[in-house]
């Protein structure tokens, strides 16, 4: 199996192709002796019940649909 970053095998010894592991990458913005666990979960699942639309957006869509239906009904 190839490398995880799809590096051309002929360029494996090139020093520019040094990719940190996930642990090394995310450790970069934390203090050296962090007492608390990671407080920003990386790549976790989002809330499956949270709907992206607000009530205002839903009301606007319903209003536009009603205008179209009334326009068709009143002006055939």
Image: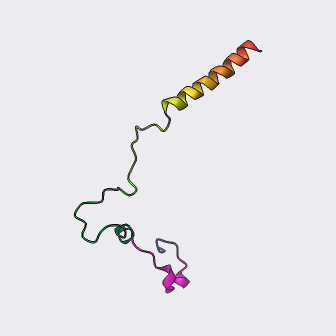
Residue plotted at (54% across, 26% down): 59
Q: Position of residue 34 (x, y in %)?
A: 25, 66
Q: Is residue 31 above or below residue 55?
A: below
Give the total number of marks visible in the rendering: 0
Colouring scheme, one of rainbow, by chain, secondary structure, one colour: rainbow
Q: As rendered, which of 47 and 7 lies closer to the eye?
A: 47
44 sits to left or right of 4: left
Q: Residue at x 37, y 70 (%)?
A: 28
Image coordinates of residue 56 in percent, x first then y, are 52, 30
Asked if residue 9 is among those painted magenta in the image, a careful observer would answer yes
- Closer-to-camera residue (34/12): 34
Asked whether residue 24 is drawn in magenta, I would say no
Between 18 and 71, the one nearer to me in the picture:
71
The residue segment tinted magenta is 6-21
Task: Report the side of 56 relative to 32 (left or right).
Answer: right
Main SS of the magenta segment?
Answer: loop
From what the image shows, is residue 31 above or below residue 14? above
Q: Nearer the viewer, residue 67 or 12?
A: 67
Residue 53: image location, x then y, percent: 50, 35
Say whether residue 2 is left or right of residue 23: right
The residue located at (68%, 16%) in the rendering is 70
View extreme (front): residue: 31
* Quadrant in which the C terminus is drawn: top right
Q: Residue furthest right?
A: 76
Question: Residue pushed farthest left?
Answer: 35
Q: Residue furthest bottom?
A: 13
Residue 63 placed where, x, y %? 60, 23
Q: Residue at x 26, y 60 (%)?
A: 37
- Residue 4 left/right relative to 75: left
Q: In this rendering, is residue 23 above or below 76? A: below
Residue 61, picture quadrant: top right
């Amino acid at each position: 199996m190839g490398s995880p970053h799809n590096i051309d095998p002929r360029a494996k010894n090139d020093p520019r192709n040094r990719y940190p592991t996930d642990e090394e990458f995310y450790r970069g913005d934390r203090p050296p002796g962090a007492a608390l666990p990671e407080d920003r979960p990386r790549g976790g699942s989002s809330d499956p019940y949270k709907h992206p639309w607000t009530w205002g957006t839903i009301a606007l869509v319903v209003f536009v649909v009603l205008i179209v239906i009334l326009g068709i009904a009143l002006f055939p």
